[in-house]
Amino acid sequence: MKTELNLKQRQIKNTSYLVKCTLIWLLTLALCSFGPTLIWDRAEIISGFFIVVNVIAGIVMILANKRYLQGMDELMQKIHLSAMGFTLGAILVGGLAYTNLQLSGLIDFKAQIPDLMFLMGAVYLISVYVLNKHYCAGDD
């Protein structure tokens, strides 16, 4: 007989699975980034293999994120989905503005993907925090 998990148990299980998937993806990303120069002397077949492994690990991580979100209650889903919307907007508007600043010569350094990743993480974390404060005020 299969017993159904309560919300807290489901959140712990989904969070644990998401952490594992994210760590595996990060490890494969590190292999793709540093392996060609530090481990396998730029062998294209090995690099290609690990890039495919990284993409597969990324897809699994995306599915783990979906499962994580689906396991939340409706309020937490609303908070996280709103934060994702703010993040998407900030990356789109901020990223294009950043690129145009560089293209127009107003800044002298080149726009890089890690800069956008930092902005994305910061906007998401701040959005979740602010939305939690907004929707959960007085729940203490």
Image (cartoon, rainbow, N blue to C red):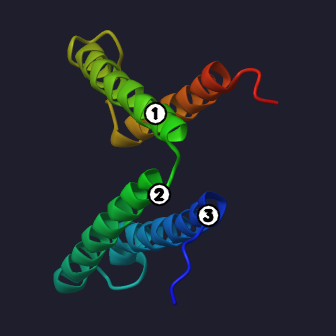
Given residues 64 and 100, the one toward you in this image is 64
**Answer yes or no: do the residues labelled 2 and 1 have beta carbons within 8 Å?**
no
> Residue at left 53%, top 35%?
75
Q: CA distance from mark 3 to mark 2?
A: 14 Å
Question: How far across and down, in percent of the image, does residue 9 sit?
Answer: 64, 66
**Answer yes or no: do the residues labelled 1 and 3 have beta carbons within 8 Å?**
no
**Left or right of residue 128: residue 60:** left
Given residues 131 and 99, the one toward you in this image is 131
> Residue at left 72%, top 21%?
137
**Left or right of residue 107: residue 46:** left
* Residue 135 against residue 60 in the figure, above or below: above
N-terminal-most mark, 1 or 3: 3
User: How many tags in the picture?
Assistant: 3
- As drawn, the residue found furthest toward the front would be 1
Res. 6 mark: 3
The quarter of the rendered structure image containing the C terminus is: top right
Give the quadrant of residue 134. Answer: top right
Residue bearing the label numbered 1: 78
**Element carrying mark 3:** loop
Given residues 50 and 88, the one toward you in this image is 88
Label 2: few (<14), some (14–19) or many (≥20) C-alpha neighbours in 10 Å: many
Q: CA distance from mark 1 to mark 3?
A: 20 Å
**Element carrying mark 1:** helix
Res. 108 mark: none
Q: Amino acid at mark 2?
A: Tyr
Q: CA distance from mark 2 to mark 1?
A: 13 Å
Residue bearing the label numbered 2: 68
> Residue at left 17%, top 85%?
45
